[in-house]
């Protein structure tokens, strides 16, 4: 009996280990869910001339007690799906090119100097995202249960955060000046964010000061700046070093302990961590778009404040089959690196904006600024889709990498679509 029991145990161990991909040293290629789990036995890196693409559903784990690192050097792309995210436990990702639909947990640091991230969920880390270079962008994300959610530090810590929820962290955002780093300013921009149930929401440190540039005795004013726009801050404590270190524009503190004012934001259910706005919220349609247009669709006369746009439930009558089912946009490929095809309702005006609200392309009048937007097919001549028109946007050299908003307008109807341009 013991002999057969031993054979059964060995067979089970072999079956389990057979589905494991052990990872060490250099990595490259394409990781799919077929190789799950990918288990790091040590720090890894992506060598010069190589790249790594991680698809939806991949599970990455750590085989040791301490955090391990993947040094990506901007050669890593992670593309999960809303229904099938990439899950990373105990691995710090340094210098990823792009990340979409990914969860990172249980690390000393979750991400270091990524370029563009969307739909990421970072939790249970000492530090969620560390940025000491210029150009990190975060969109539609959630950062929770960390000692520090996001840290922007010198020498070149510039980070832009859109539509992101910070909750149950000891400190949401930290912006710091390091006396011993080369001269530069430390800047953080937060647009349409929500802070809830953090011990402290935002800290701007150290004090603004004058620093010697070295030879010639010149001095330069160096500062830590945090700009917060169209956001909701439901945490009682915010630190700032000097006046204007933290600049709030159309951001509401709930409650505002300095004035005794501030209305309940009417979140759907904070006990279940649902921080969407209920239909009774006073902050629906309250955003000031002069401080930036959100990179997602909005309803009503203006975007809503905070990380989530309120979406009304609309009951429509059945439309005749000769009309399109919805006024909508699609774009492919997305992200793109040379040209993107945009499908919009026939007869609509199509415009492309950067995240600061500057229009970079427009049809049908053809007015463009540093970009090309042209018809892909004659209007109304689509097979099986007679009420759609396709356009091709091919940015020229003056247009930089980043997130852009495509907007279609026809009468009172508007639809927007986020596209990502990676040179």
Image: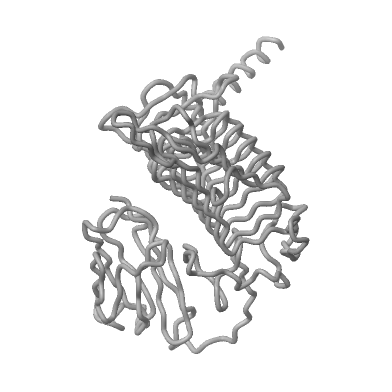
Query: Relative to residue 15, is residue 383 depicted above or below?
Result: below
* Residue furthest front as drawn: 217
Judge by depth and name the residue closer to the eye, 397 or 243.
243
Residue 323 placement (x, y as % from top left): 44, 86
Query: Relative to residue 313, is residue 423 depicted above or below?
Result: above
Asked which quadrant contains residue 215, the reply is top left
Residue 382 placement (x, y as % from top left): 30, 78
Judge by depth and name the residue closer to the eye, 338 or 161.
161
Q: Is residue 406 left or right of residue 167?
A: left
Q: Is residue 96 visible?
A: no
Q: Tell me, what colour scheme is on the image?
A: one colour
Query: Relative to residue 338, is residue 37 depicted above or below?
Result: above
Image label count: 0
Asked which quadrant contains residue 45, the reply is top left
Q: Quadrant of the N terminus?
A: top right
Q: Is residue 254 left or right of residue 74?
A: right
Residue 282 placement (x, y as % from top left): 70, 71
**Residue at 61% from the left image edge and 70% from the top image edge:** 311
Q: Is residue 413 visible?
A: yes
Judge by depth and name the residue closer to the eye, 259 or 141.
259
Residue 6 placement (x, y as % from top left): 65, 13
Q: Is residue 367 left or right of residue 26?
A: left
Judge by depth and name the residue closer to the eye, 189 or 383.
189
**Residue at 28% from the left image edge and 82% from the top image edge:** 379
* Residue furthest top as drawn: 3
Asked which quadrant contains residue 365, the reply is bottom left
Query: Relative to residue 261, is residue 273 depicted above or below?
Result: above
């Amino acid at each position: 009996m013991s002999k057969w029991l031993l054979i059964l145990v060995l067979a089970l161990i072999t079956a389990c280990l057979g589905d494991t991909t052990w990872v060490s040293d250099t990595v490259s290629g394409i990781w799919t869910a077929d190789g799950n789990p990918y288990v790091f036995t040590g720090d890894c890196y992506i060598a010069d001339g190589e790249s790594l693409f991680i698809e939806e559903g991949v599970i990455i784990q750590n085989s040791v007690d301490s955090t391990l690192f993947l040094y990506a050097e901007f050669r890593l792309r992670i593309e999960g799906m809303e229904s099938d995210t990439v899950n990373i436990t105990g691995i710090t990702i340094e210098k990823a090119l792009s990340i979409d639909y990914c969860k990172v947990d249980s690390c000393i640091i979750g991400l270091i100097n990524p370029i563009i991230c969307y739909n990421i969920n970072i939790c249970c880390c000492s530090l969620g995202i560390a940025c000491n270079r210029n150009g990190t962008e975060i969109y539609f994300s959630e950062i929770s249960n960390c000692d520090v959610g996001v840290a922007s530090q010198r020498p070149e810590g510039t980070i832009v955060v859109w539509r992101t929820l910070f909750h149950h962290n000891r400190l949401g955002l930290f912006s710091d000046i390091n006396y011993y780093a080369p001269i530069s300013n430390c800047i953080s921009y937060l647009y349409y964010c929500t802070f809830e149930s953090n011990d402290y929401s935002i800290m701007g440190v150290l004090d603004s000061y004058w620093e010697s540039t070295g030879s010639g005795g010149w001095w330069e004013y160096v500062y830590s700046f945090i700009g917060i726009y169209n956001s909701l801050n439901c945490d009682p404590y915010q630190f700032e070093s000097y006046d204007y270190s933290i600049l709030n524009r159309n951001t509401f503190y709930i409650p505002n302990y300095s004035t005794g004012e501030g209305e309940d934001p009417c979140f759907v259910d904070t006990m279940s961590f649902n921080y969407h706005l209920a239909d009774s919220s006073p902050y629906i349609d309250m955003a000031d778009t002069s401080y930036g247009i959100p990179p997602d669709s909005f309803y009503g006369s203006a975007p809503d404040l905070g990380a989530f746009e309120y979406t009304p439930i609309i009951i429509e009558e059945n439309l005749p089959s000769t009309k399109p089912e919805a006024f909508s946009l699609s774009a492919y490929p997305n992200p793109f690196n040379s040209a993107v095809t945009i499908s919009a309702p026939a007869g609509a005006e199509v415009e492309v904006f950067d995240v600061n609200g500057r229009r970079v392309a427009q049809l049908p009048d053809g007015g463009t600024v540093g970009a090309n937007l042209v018809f892909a097919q004659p209007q109304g001549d689509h097979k099986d889709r007679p009420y759609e028109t396709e356009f091709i946007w091919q940015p020229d050299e003056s247009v930089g990498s980043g997130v852009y908003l495509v907007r279609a307008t026809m009468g009172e109807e508007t639809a927007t679509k986020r596209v990502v341009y990676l040179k």
